[in-house]
Image: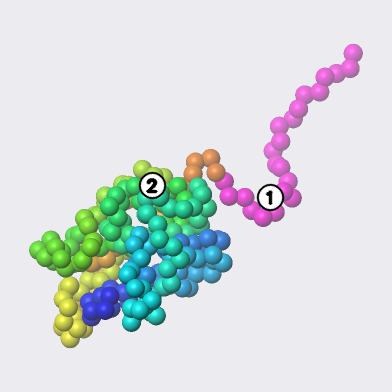
């Protein structure tokens, strides 16, 4: 995140998260991984946490630590310390790619989210210039495992009863570290969004957890009148 390319990536992801989570309401929100990104800073839920899989060594003495989101706890992505159906919002910024078992991480996300809870996922797009460079140069994106394709991720979410609300791509510039040349390719973002959106270097997805048979009730449901009640037969006195 300290390189010109990393700053470009962070700026796009931060802007998208700020716009999306600002209008998501509830009580409990969790960001899982990547303290460089402040995904919940515009969200207004009273309880917001950041969890990571591994705490950085000597975190307090790292110069850039002041710009990072404070870490609340360390946990296994596949075994979160939350009750079932207890979170309203869960953000996974590249967490699936950093997880040893991304499918198990998604199952855990489904477990801890409340019905109609929101799941925000950010991941690298393997079908892009960034994905091509990662294929040619495996250490281009350090510590990240297998890149998960858009169709594959949506299939996993569908099996877990998630419904896709938002699916968008960004970062269409080539994956080059030279800041001067990176700025010269700024025109590719505007053209990419309109012409080849599916080939952006990063994929952002928002899904909602659906539970069959669950219906959200309005606050005044107790005062609402019941309409269309079937008549009840009454025994006639003899």
Q: Nearer the viewer, residue 152 or 31?
A: 31
| Image coords of residue 172 (percent x, y) | 22, 71
The residue drawn where x is 19% and y is 60% is 127
Q: CA distance from mark 1 to mark 2?
A: 32 Å
Read off the residue under disc 1.
221
Q: Is residue 219 visible?
A: yes
Disc number lying in front (1 or 2): 2
**Residue 229 is covered by the magenta coloring:** yes
Residue at 45% across / 66% down in the picture?
72
Q: Mainly helix, strand or loop, the magenta region? A: loop
Residue drawn at x 25%, y 71% as measured from the top left: 171
Whether residue 167 is visible, yes or no, is no
The crowd level at tag 2 (other Cα within 10 Å; few <14, some 14-19, many 20+) is some
In what quadrant of the picture does the C terminus appear?
A: top right
Q: Secondary structure at mark 1?
A: helix
**Residue 10 lies in quadrant:** bottom left
Is 60 on the left-hand or right-hand side of 147? right
- The magenta region covers 215-238
Q: Which image quarter is the N terminus in?
A: bottom left
Judged left or right of residue 195, residue 12 is right
Percent of width and height locating residue 204: 33, 63
Quick check: 14 left or right of 185? right
Q: Which residue is mark 2?
A: 107
């Amino acid at each position: 995140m300290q390189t010109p390319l990393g700053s470009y990536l962070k700026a796009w992801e931060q802007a998208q998260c700020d716009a999306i989570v600002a209008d998501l309401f509830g009580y409990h929100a969790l960001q899982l991984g990547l303290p460089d990104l402040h995904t919940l800073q515009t969200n207004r839920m009273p309880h917001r946490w950041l969890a990571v899989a591994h705490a950085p060594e000597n975190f307090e003495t790292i110069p850039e630590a002041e710009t990072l989101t404070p870490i609340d706890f360390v946990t296994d992505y596949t075994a979160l310390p939350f009750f079932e159906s207890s979170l309203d919002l869960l953000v996974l910024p590249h967490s699936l790619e950093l997880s040893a078992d991304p499918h198990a991480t998604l199952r855990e996300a489904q477990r801890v989210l409340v019905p109609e809870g929101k799941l925000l996922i950010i991941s690298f797009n393997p079908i892009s210039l960034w994905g091509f460079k990662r294929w040619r140069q495996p250490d281009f994106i350090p510590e990240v495992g297998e890149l998960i394709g858009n169709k594959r991720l949506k299939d996993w979410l569908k099996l877990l009863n998630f419904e896709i609300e938002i699916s968008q791509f960004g970062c269409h510039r080539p994956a080059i570290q030279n800041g001067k040349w990176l700025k010269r390719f700024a025109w590719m973002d505007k053209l990419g969004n309109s012409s080849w959106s599916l080939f952006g270097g990063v994929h952002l997805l928002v899904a909602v957890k659906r539970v069959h048979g669950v219906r959200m009730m309005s606050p005044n449901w107790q005062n609402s009148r019941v309409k269309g009640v079937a008549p009840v037969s009454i025994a006639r006195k003899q």
